[in-house]
Image (cartoon, rainbow, N blue to C red):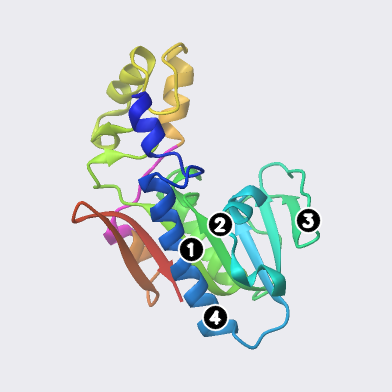
Amino acid sequence: MNILLKLVDAQNTKTIAYKKRAKRMKLFEDFFEENFKNATNVKILDVGGLQKFWDSLNFNGIFKSEITLLNLKAEKITSDKFISIAGNGTKLEFKDNEFDIVFSNSVIEHVGDFENQLKMANEVKRVGKKIFIQTPNKYFPIEPHFLTPFIQLMPLHVSAFLLRHFHLGYHKEDMTKERSLQIIKNVRLISFSEIKKMFPNYNIYKEKMFGLTKSFIIFG
């Protein structure tokens, strides 16, 4: 398991995870330049993002962007290019089209059931003139949070049992039954058909690993 954790360390420039994220950000930069090449002040809302995410990838458009980081709790920031606020991705307290881009990386799968995920999808479309949203594929064999094959397709009580008794991903096995169920319920991966229902008329890019779709990027 420690080997797997090292392989998915997105802060380590030598890992597959870092390279995948860097490629994703290259797609975002191309998307940014295509739509805002001549803009002087691009307002970006990052739902669930942190400053260190942007710092680690050296986003070239940072000099002409203002990035609002929205999380359940505001975080400490060290650059005037960022604004950190508390909020909920399923109910964004912003006006329609207030942001040029709404960005979100691996967040929508954490907001609850399909109804809540649909609420977040509708909210990012409402407040953003453009969107760039990434989320893991439900049917990729290795679940990315627990690093366990097909645990996302198991009954809740089975996956919670495995979580309590084995070291799965970033989670240690020392926890109560209630806590294990809470952690499992906090992740609901999304299928391609559900993505199309949430984001009709948007582009969907399929990120590949070993020839299989690892995650989706919704943009437009």
Q: Amino acid at mark 1?
A: Met
Sequence-first disc among 1 and 3 = 1
Crowd rating for badge 3 (residues with CA inside 10 Å; few <14, some 14–19, many 20+): few
Task: Identify the residue at the far front of this view.
Answer: 14
Q: Is residue 115 left or right of residue 125?
A: left
The residue that mark 3 highlights is 79
Q: Is residue 162 left or right of residue 172?
A: left
Residue 25 numbered mark, or none: 1
Sequence-first disc among 4 and 2 = 4
Residue at (63% x, 48% y) in the render: 52
Give the magenta part as a residue range.
187-194
Locate residue 147, reporting x and y percent.
33, 33
Q: Which structural element holds mark 4?
A: helix
Q: Is residue 85 left or right of residue 155?
A: right
The residue that mark 2 highlights is 57
Q: Is residue 92 left or right of residue 25?
A: right
Above-or-below relation of 51 to 144: below
Q: Amino acid at mark 3?
A: Ser
- The answer to which quarter of the image holds residue 22 is bottom left
